[in-house]
Amino acid sequence: MAISHRSRSTMLSRRALNRAFLARQLLLERVAHKPLDVIEHLVGLQAQAPQPPYVGLWTRIRDFVPHDLSQLLLDRSAVRIILMRSTVHLVSAADCLRLRPAVQPCLDRAVGPRGWRRLAGVEPGELAAHGRAWLDEEPRSAAELNQLLGKRWPDVDRPLLARALRAVVPMVQIPPRGLWGRSGRPVYATAETWLGAPLHPEPSLPSLVRRYLAAFGPASVADIQLWCGLTHLREIVEAERHELIRFTDENGTELFDLPDAPRPGPDADSPVRFLAEFDNAVLSHADRSRIIGVDDQKRIITKNALVLGTVLVDGFVSGLWRVENERKRSWLVITPFRPLSGTERGALTEEGGRLLRFMAPDADDQDVIIQADHASGGREDPRVD
């Protein structure tokens, strides 16, 4: 039974919170929406690597065609840019112009007062002016920008200087970076030049909060701040309190939500799903227990901060997945975190086969392999021969 949106003090069990969250993330049932609409609904997809956004849309959109996303990048309807949590996101052009100024304080903290002290003699305004001039002459790679930075400021910390440049200048990664089936080093242009429009002069934090709740709620203030990297948002939420509804989780934490957002009950069916590497579904809450157990959170992130592809069984992260290729052979390897029932194994094999056909359509030999040794926890997965 769905939970009434009129309730203002209802406690949401972990499963009820899970189902509400998965509904917002379009993970209970694939939708027939256009990719750009889904990208905007999700407030972007985290995109440190080119391929994960394609998998993220495939697992949410019925009959998703990867060319459709590539075309959005080519016609500049979508871009790749550093945004929330100072990480690369794929967002719509409109959201790029709205979100980049909204999350500027988060980007500023990536350098911070201590960083600017180490960059003695480098003024933020001068750095921004030089960076814009270089990028407006022509798009440039990171190596080219580093060379120019070194010539202008030869005696400062070069990696820190490059990080500061990304903070003071909104830089988008332009194609072919991010295209399906293509490779290429990141090459940058300014957002304003690439999109032919200025950044939004007055970003709305209340709107940002509402959009987060629409895609990630119900959620606490700490959840919202973790997702976007901003601080002091409680006053924003408090100002909107009369238009939001409130719940508590099993720990008594206050959660906020939009009145008309979907909240299916805890018994709603949740089919198996494969989440992409870096998927925001497992990264965007201070309390991630709504989708992944505390111990399992350590298993999905490598020592060099890569977030691995994960498997949802009954709505919760229950393992890892990866695709391996050898000549014309491709196989999907699933490493479960716990024993699986026969029904769960069958569902994973079926859905995994669809994922493998999407990711390796030209492979002559395809196979889905579910590893029996779940005790490894995905830390050292032996290669399957």
Image (spheres, helix red, strand yellow):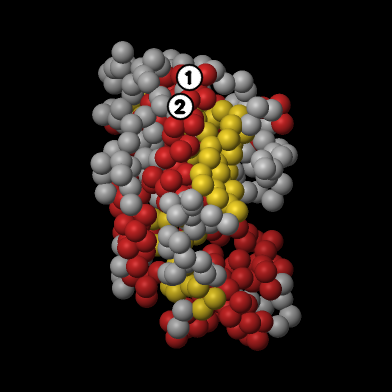
Q: Is residue 335 left or right of residue 128?
A: right
Q: Residue at x 33, y 24 (%)?
A: 263
In the depicted structure, whether residue 122 falls above or below residue 115? below
80 or 362: nearer the viewer = 362
What residue would you read off at disc 2? Answer: 347
281 or 51: nearer the viewer = 51
Q: Give the Cα distance between marks 1 and 2.
A: 6 Å
Q: Residue at x 67, y 69 (%)?
A: 159
Q: Residue at x 53, y 37 (%)?
A: 368
Amino acid tagged 2: Ala
Residue 46 visible to an observer of this rendering: no
114 or 149: nearer the viewer = 149
| Residue 349 in the image, given as x and y percentages of width and height | 49, 31
In the depicted structure, whether residue 316 falls above or below residue 80? above
Q: Is residue 44 left or right of residue 154?
A: left
| Residue 332, label in figure | none
Q: Residue at x 37, y 61 (%)?
A: 70
Q: How many marks?
A: 2
Element carrying mark 1: helix
Amino acid tagged 1: Thr
Element carrying mark 2: helix
What residue would you read off at disc 1? Answer: 343
| Residue 335 in the image, given as x and y percentages of width and height | 62, 33
